[in-house]
Image (cartoon, grey):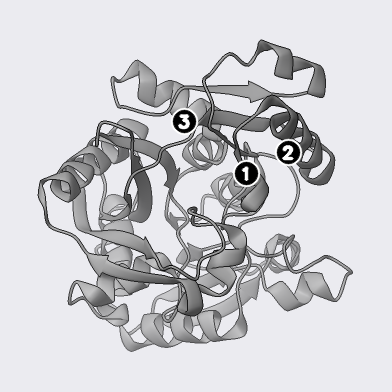
């Protein structure tokens, strides 16, 4: 039987070490790991729960190996943190699900991702990356502006303070983000229109859009942005629907183009928001999309589009096995 290692970061493991709920927002809950274990096992694989990168180091140092690793580790330290587990697996020549280190490193840095998009002619909001507070003087983009950490996920560092309409608020928010997240801050034009996320599966010429999901905020939402506080209480503030109008179709086309451009692997999510003219602009690329079957965007999108959680995970596994040439019996 083929042995599949499961690498992941559990919220509880880091909260016990003193980290805050927001600091571990990207990490997983036990029910996510249970769901993945059950889905992969149901496909006929033997699942070995390894855990975070520190557990993986111990696992490898003890001489253990897997035929394939299903990696959802987000990492804790550094802008290249999502790439750490894949780098380690590459060193040991162990195949793994999802994208390679260079792709994970690129896409976590939203500034670099937007530069690549601009170069490829893909619309994205005008932006600047600020590394220290004195650089705010160089920001000449018209208000309103949107600010967020350059390398976070799960809407960490995105809240009411992210939408600013004057220079005083801009300086206040950027200063807060620099001191809180200890990384550069992305300052960009605020995109006022509809927001979409596109689910992607496969890679290369086999890349497909799983569907386009629109994120709808209700009247109770504290601000017009899909923020960290909104995501925490998504059942109270947000709803989701599969969109199939021309704008949604355009988002799906752009997502496939971007996924091929960055050479994304197996599955992910790409987010868009419309500008003043109704044109989809790239927000960010997520090659390590959340996989909680209940509240993560990619499984929600799949479910709304008629794809079960088990079918989603099966497609991801099939993509990885195919690109590694692992035509092996389960």
Q: Where in the figure is residue 34, as x and y percent of width and height?
A: 52, 86
Residue 113: numbered disc:
3
| Residue 277 placement, left or right of 27 | left
What is the count of numbered marks? 3
Residue 261: numbered disc:
none
Q: Nearer the viewer, residue 1 or 238?
A: 238
Q: Secondary structure at mark 3?
A: helix
Mark 1 neighbour density, 10 Å: few (under 14) some (14–19) many (20 or more): many
The residue singled out by tag 2 in the image is: 173
Name the N-terminal-most of marks 1 and 2: 1
Q: Nearer the viewer, mark 1 or mark 3?
A: 1
Q: CA distance from mark 1 to mark 2?
A: 7 Å
Residue 294 in sight from this viewpoint: yes
Toward the right, the furthest residue is 18
Q: Nearer the viewer, residue 274 or 109?
A: 274
| Residue 88 placement, left or right of 21 | left
| Residue 70 placement, left or right of 300 | right
Q: Secondary structure at mark 2?
A: helix
Name the N-terminal-most of marks 1 and 3: 3
Q: Where in the figure is residue 57, as x and y percent of width and height?
A: 73, 60
Q: Where in the figure is residue 123, as x and y percent of width and height?
A: 32, 27
Q: Quadrant of the C terminus?
A: bottom left
Q: Nearer the viewer, mark 2 or mark 3?
A: 2
The residue singled out by tag 1 in the image is: 162
Q: Nearer the viewer, residue 178 or 32?
A: 178
């Amino acid at each position: 039987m083929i042995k599949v290692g499961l690498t992941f970061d559990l919220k509880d493991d880091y909260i016990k070490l003193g980290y805050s709920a927001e600091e571990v927002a990207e990490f997983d809950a036990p029910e996510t790991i249970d769901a993945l274990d059950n889905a992969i096992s149901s496909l006929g694989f033997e699942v070995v729960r390894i855990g975070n990168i520190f557990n993986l180091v111990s696992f490898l140092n003890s001489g253990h190996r897997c035929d394939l690793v299903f990696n959802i580790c987000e990492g804790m330290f550094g802008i290249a943190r999502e790439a750490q587990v894949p780098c380690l697996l590459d060193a040991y020549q162990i195949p793994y699900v999802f994208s390679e280190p260079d792709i994970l490193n690129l896409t976590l840095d939203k500034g670099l991702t937007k530069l690549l998009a601009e170069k490829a002619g893909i619309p994205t909001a005008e932006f600047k990356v600020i590394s220290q507070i004195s650089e705010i003087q160089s920001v000449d983009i018209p208000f309103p502006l949107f600010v967020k950490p350059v390398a976070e996920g799960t809407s960490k560092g995105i809240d009411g303070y992210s939408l600013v309409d004057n220079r005083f608020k801009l300086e206040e928010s950027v200063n807060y983000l620099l001191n809180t997240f200890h990384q550069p801050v992305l300052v960009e034009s605020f995109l006022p229109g509809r927001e979409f996320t596109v689910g992607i599966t496969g890679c290369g010429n086999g890349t497909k859009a799983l569907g386009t999901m629109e994120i709808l905020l209700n009247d109770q939402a504290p601000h017009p942005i899909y923020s960290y506080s909104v995501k925490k209480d998504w059942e109270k503030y947000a709803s989701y629907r599969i969109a199939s109008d021309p704008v949604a179709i355009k988002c799906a086309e752009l997502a496939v183009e971007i996924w091929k451009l960055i050479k994304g692997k197996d599955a992910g999510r790409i987010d868009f928001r419309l500008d003043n003219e109704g044109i989809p602009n790239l927000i960010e690329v997520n090659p390590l999309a959340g996989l909680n079957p209940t509240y993560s965007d990619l499984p929600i999108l799949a479910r709304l589009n008629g794809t079960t959680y088990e079918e989603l995970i099966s497609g991801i596994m099939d993509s990885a096995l195919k690109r590694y040439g692992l035509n092996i019996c389960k």
